[in-house]
Structure formats: structure tokens, C-alpha cells
Amino acid sequence: MRTVIASFVPLKLTLLVILFLSLWQGSGGSENPTMSTVPPFVQAVDFPKLMYRFTAGLTLNRRTITSAGVSYLFSRSGKTFSTTIALYSDPKLAGEAMQTHSAFLMVGPSPAPVKIGDELLVYGSADSQGGSLLFRRSNVFVVLGPGVPMEERLALANNLDVAFQTDVPEVMLVSNLKVPQILSVELPKTVHPRQVAMGKIEVRGTEGISFQFACDSGSVSIQTVPIPMVIYTAPAEAMEHQFELVLATAGNLLVKKTVTISVTPEN
């Protein structure tokens, strides 16, 4: 009886070890090229080229930097197609940008018919080419606006979503984002109505990165030569004036800094 038990235990252990190894190897072991080699963040996107890859007949008309993201206006067959993309330093910031943008849309959301990205919002319209489609994948937020039928936009969004997770030439994936910073804007904290002030923009982490500044406020203009400067014209009335300075890289990574200036009446 003891001899039977002694021979059975090693056999049982051997079978368990073989089963474990086969399952481990079948799952790719500790080196799964599909999961472990795909970084989680998007550092840069050549958005026009990516759009050309998935949508035939597009022509880029304009690129505009705003606090909501980098807006690309395309045309096709005599119609315009508005899009926006923004890369952020954190997926949470991209999600917040998506929710903020959706608050400005006038038509209520329709149930999302498919799963695209980490978040998806589809805004319907009586016109099949109207409405908007918004989605987020990790730190990337995209808006596909009117101008192309919604069915085609859903297919486009799905292709873009896959590209943001894949090693394609138009997308740079990284494990650790390199994010430039706007350290300071050297404007006075207090000015008088209609006063004009100039201030230097201090940045960090822009070495080897092509970038531009922008600001949505009509009180602000920006010059970059010989150094980045803000030219600020105060409003005509006293107030706490707040504006957002935006730095956008060529790869559509956005960095923002809020500046507050107290406009006080002259004594």
C-alpha cells in the first residue's frame, strides 16, 4: 500500500506541472508581445496623415490650436469635415476635456451603438451628416464633427482607436510621456483698464520638440521671435480677468496654463 502511494504522488505532481507549463506557454509565458510591448500612452500623432490613411479624398484646409484641442478642418467633395484631437499628460485630463466639450453640444446624446475607446459619446442629428462623435483612448481625445455620414465616422473612429494602440508610422507610443511645461508668464498681477503689458513665457522640456502657443482670449496676442512673449491688453472695465495659455506640440500634445490678472481702476 505504501509503495502504491509513493508511486502515485510523483505522477500526480508531474501531471500538474505539465498542465501548468502548457497553460503558461500557451498564454505566451512572461513574454506576450501583444500585451507587454504596447505602451499605454500616445506621445504624438501625425493626424492629417492618419486621416488620409483611413478616409479617401480628404484635403486639409486649416489647423487651429484652441483650448479645446487642435482643430483640423478637412474638405471632401465640396463639403467640410471638422475634427479635433488633443493629447494630454494624463487619461483623466483627456476624460475631463471630453466631458467639457460635450457640454457645449446642443443635441442630446444618442446611445452609443458600438464600443470604441475607453469612452464614447455619439450626438445624433436629423441630418445623417450632422451631430458629433467624441471618443477617448487613454490620453487621447478626439472629436469627429459634421460633414461625413455618421456610419462612416463610426468606422473611422474605430480605425483611429486601433491606431492609437498600434505601432503605425503616424502614431508614437511611449511608456512614459515627455510633457513640456509652461512654468510662468511674466505679466504684472495688477493692471489698469486698457493698459498694455508684455511678459516672457518661461517653458521647460521643449528641447527637440516643435511647438506653438495659442490663446482663445481676444486680449492676448503671442509673439515667438526672438523669445516667446505674451502681449496683453486689459479690458475696458475693472475685473478679475482670467485666460488660458495653450502650448501645442506638432504631435498634438496639449499643455495649458491659466493666468489671472486683476484689472483695477486708476486712482
Image (cartoon, helix red, strand yellow):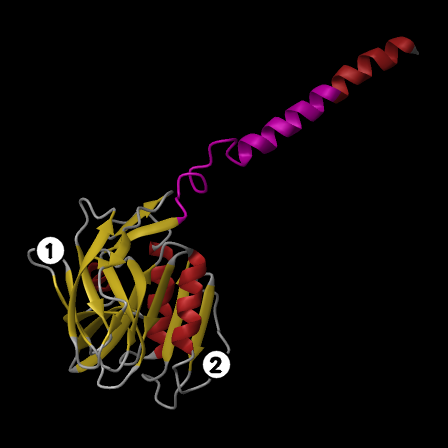
Residue placed at 41% from the left, 77% from the top? Answer: 102
Q: For the view shown, which residue lies furthest in the left direction?
A: 226
The image shows residue 222 at horizontal and vertical percentages of: 15, 67
Residue placed at 19% from the left, 44% from the top? Answer: 207
The image shows residue 240 at horizontal and vertical percentages of: 33, 77
> Label 2 vs label 1: CA separation?
47 Å
**Which structural element holds mark 2?**
strand
Q: Judge whether residue 5 can be spotted in this image.
A: yes
Between 159 and 186, which is closer to the camera in this rendering?
Answer: 186
Residue 201 quadrant: bottom left
* Residue 22 is one of the magenta-drawn residues: yes
Q: Is residue 97 above or below residue 123?
A: above
Q: Is residue 87 above or below residue 233?
A: above
The image shows residue 72 at horizontal and vertical percentages of: 22, 70
Q: Which residue is mark 2?
A: 110
The image shows residue 44 at horizontal and vertical percentages of: 27, 53
Amino acid type assigned to the residue bearing label 1 in the image:
Ile
Residue 162 quadrant: bottom left
**Which structural element holds mark 1?**
loop
Residue placed at 58% from the left, 31% from the top? Answer: 24
Q: For the view shown, which residue lies furthest in the bottom direction?
A: 126
Q: Which residue is mark 1?
A: 227
* Residue 125 is one of the magenta-drawn residues: no
Amino acid type assigned to the residue bearing label 2 in the image:
Ser
Instruction: Give the magenta range.
Output: 13-40
